Image: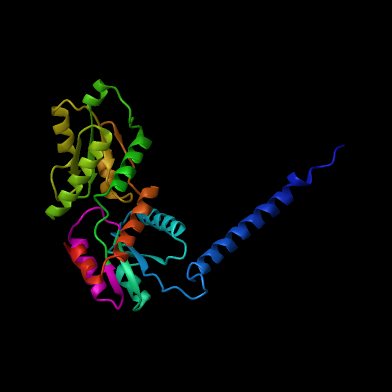
Amino acid sequence: MTASNPLHDESTTVHLDSTAHLMNRISARLASRLSVLTLDGRRRPEAPALVVVAHGSRDPRALTTVSALLDQVRALRPGLPVHLGHIELNEPLLPDTLAALGDREAILVPLLLSRGYHIKRDIPEMAAESSVRARVAGALGPHPLLVEALTARLVEAGWRTRMDESTRRTSAVVLAAAGSRDPESKLDTSRTARLLADRLGVPVVPAYATTAAPTVPDALAELAARGRTRVAVASYFTAPGRFATECAQKAPWMASAPLGTHPAMARLLLHRYDQMLKTPATAALELATA
C-alpha cells in the first residue's frame, strides 16, 4: 500500500486554496490603502467618486447586469469609489445616491448610449439639487469601444467576420436602439451605425424600438427590398429589458445580446470618467448639455 502524496491530499488542497484566497484579499486591501498614499507617505487628494447613472428597468435582469458591470469597473480601478444611481424604476435612485455622498466631489457618467433628455436635463438637474460637487459626462456613444462590444456580441450570436463576396452582398445588420425624440440622439446612433458598418464591411441600418423611425420591421423590409436577406439585429442596449427583447424577437436570422458586461463597456465608463477629470466643472456642464 503506497502512502498518499501530501501535496495532493484533499484537506491540504482546501487549505492551500483558502490561504491563497486570504492572501488575495490582503493584497487587494493593501493595494487599495497604498493607492491613496504618495511615495513619501503623504495622503493623496481624494479622487472624485464615480457615479454610474443607469436608466432603470422593470426587468430584474437589468439591475443584475448593471451591478455586475460596476464590479468590473471596480476591478479595473481598485480604490476608486464607484456608486450606482437610477433615473427611475430601480433603487438606488440617483438623488438618494447623491444625498449619501454629502458634499464630496463626484463625476456622473450616464450609462446611456446617445444624447437625449435624460443627459441634457434630468441628470444635470438632479445633480444641481444635491450638495455634491458634480461634473456630468456626456453619452457613452458614439465610440470605438461600443463598436468593439457590438461586434463581439454579433460574433457570439453566430456572425462570421470573414465571408465570401456573394455572402457579403446579401448580408446586413440592423442596429436596434431604444429611440428618442431628440434629433441628436438619432445622430449619435447613426454615427455608431456607420462605425459598425466600417468594421463589418456590410450595410448597418439604425432602427428604433419606440418614438423614432424607422422601426426594426421597417428597416428589415427596406434591406430585404435591396436584396439583403441575411440580416442580423444588433442589440444597441446596455442591459436586457422589454425593448431589447422585442427587437430581438423580430430578427429574421440572428440577434445579438445587449452590450451588458462586455469588458469594453467597463473600459468606456472609466474613459468617460477620466475625460471629466481633465475637464473644468463649467466646461463639463456645457459638454453634458450640448
Magenta span contains residue 117: yes
Residue 183 makes an appearance in the image: yes
Against 2, residue 102 (above or below) is: below
Q: In the picture, which quadrant includes the C terminus?
A: bottom left
Colouring mode (rainbow / by chain / secondary structure / one colour):
rainbow
Q: Nearer the viewer, residue 259 or 139?
A: 139
Q: Name the image quarter holding residue 164.
A: top left
Q: Nearer the viewer, residue 163 or 18?
A: 163
Task: Name which residue lies at 17% across and 29% down.
Answer: 224
Q: In the picture, which quadrant includes the N terminus?
A: top right
> Among all residues in the image, which is located at the extreme right?
1
* Residue 245, x across and y down, in percent: 29, 44
Q: Name the image quarter holding residue 222.
A: top left
Q: Name the image quarter holding residue 99.
A: bottom left
Q: Is residue 142 left or right of residue 84?
A: left
Magenta segment range?
Answer: 111-135
Task: Name which residue lies at 33% across and 70% down.
Answer: 106
Magenta span contains residue 67: no
Task: Name which residue lies at 26% across and 23% down.
Answer: 167
Q: Is residue 127 left or right of residue 7?
A: left
* Residue 131, x across and y down, in percent: 30, 78
Residue 180 makes an appearance in the image: no
Task: Name which residue lies at 22% across and 50% down.
Answer: 178
* Residue 289, x across and y down, in percent: 18, 64
Give the tally of numbered discs.
0
> Among all residues in the image, which is located at the extreme front?
40
